[in-house]
Structures are given as C-alpha cells and as structure tokens.
Amino acid sequence: MATNIGTGPQDIPLNQFLGEMAFQDSIYSQGTWLPTQSNATITTDQTQNPWTRIGNLVFATARITWSGNSNGSNADIGNLPFDPAGYINSSCGGPITEGSISYAGEITASVESSSNLIRFRRNNTVLTNSNLSGIDLRFSVWYHTNR
C-alpha cells in the first residue's frame, strides 16, 4: 500500500489526507452468518445468509426454516454478524419478502438492540416458535453498530 500521494517533495501523506479512510477494512466488509434460535430447531444454510457492513451500518439477510413445534417462546433469532450495541433507535428491519405462509407480507423482522436479537412481529404482536412451526422465511434487517 502506498504511503504517499505523488512522488515529489510536495507529496501528501496518504494517511493524513484520507484519515480513517486509509483503512478500508474498517469501512467495508462482507461475509455470511449463521443464525441461531435457542428454543426451537431451525434449519438454515450459511451460504444463503449474507451480510454487508459499510462503516457502522450492517445489512444482513437470512433464510430460515422452523421445525414443527409447539414452543410458546419468542421466535427470536440470535448470533447477528455484529452487536447493535444499544442503537435501538436506528435498528431497522422490513417485511418478510418470501415465506411459506399466506400472511408472510404482514410479518416484519427487526433488530432488538437491547438483546442483540432479531424479533418477528405480525400486527405488532411478537411471534412465537409455535406461530412459525414448519414455516420457511427469508428476511433482511439493517442496523447500526459502534464497532
């Protein structure tokens, strides 16, 4: 990596000119993640769960299938690629874009930064594992992190 812009005595030191931008890996990174669920069995393929981080903004997508169960615990998903670290006012989600249930478009996924989980809701009601028993969902969330 070059340390200066130019080749003469008037060169501008690259780090001074770009500041933090000189370290691109802190600005942009991408990978895959493996969602977890502590109260029910889920099936997922890590290769279908990409994430992208630009600065402190993280965008994560996943496809998950819940096994058949009657567990009444929240259908929360853990193991986010980065901890939202208390940015509850800027943690966002969106509607489910694909699902094996008729009301998939009515479900939203959002990051609960106080607990580092993704929570699913329908009409502002938190969904449980039994609500999603045998269901396949694809969703995306975006949120801020301070790392």
Image: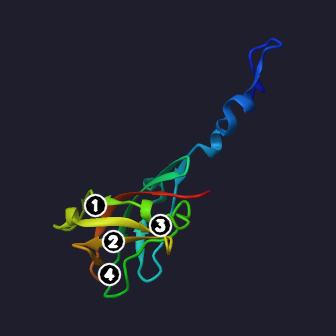
The answer to which of marks 3 and 1 sits earlier in the sequence is 3
Q: CA distance from mark 4 to mark 3?
A: 16 Å
- Local crowd at mark 3 within 10 Å, few (<14), some, or many (≥20)? many
The x and y percentages for residue 77 are 43, 71
Q: Residue 140, located in which quarter of the rendered image?
A: bottom left
Cβ–Cβ under 8 Å for marks 2 and 1: yes
Disc sitting over residue 96 in the figure: 1
Give the secondary structure at mark 4. loop
Q: Nearer the viewer, residue 104 or 115?
A: 115
- Local crowd at mark 1 within 10 Å, few (<14), some, or many (≥20)? some
In this rendering, would 90 be left or right of 120? right
Q: CA distance from mark 3 to mark 1?
A: 16 Å
Residue named by callout 2: 120
Give the secondary structure at mark 2. strand
Give the secondary structure at mark 3. loop
Give the secondary structure at mark 1. loop
The colour scheme applied to this rendered structure is rainbow
- Type of amino acid at the residue the image marks with label 2: Phe
In this rendering, would 100 be left or right of 5? left
Disc sitting over residue 128 in the figure: 4
Cβ–Cβ under 8 Å for marks 4 and 3: no
Residue plotted at (32% across, 81% down) = 128
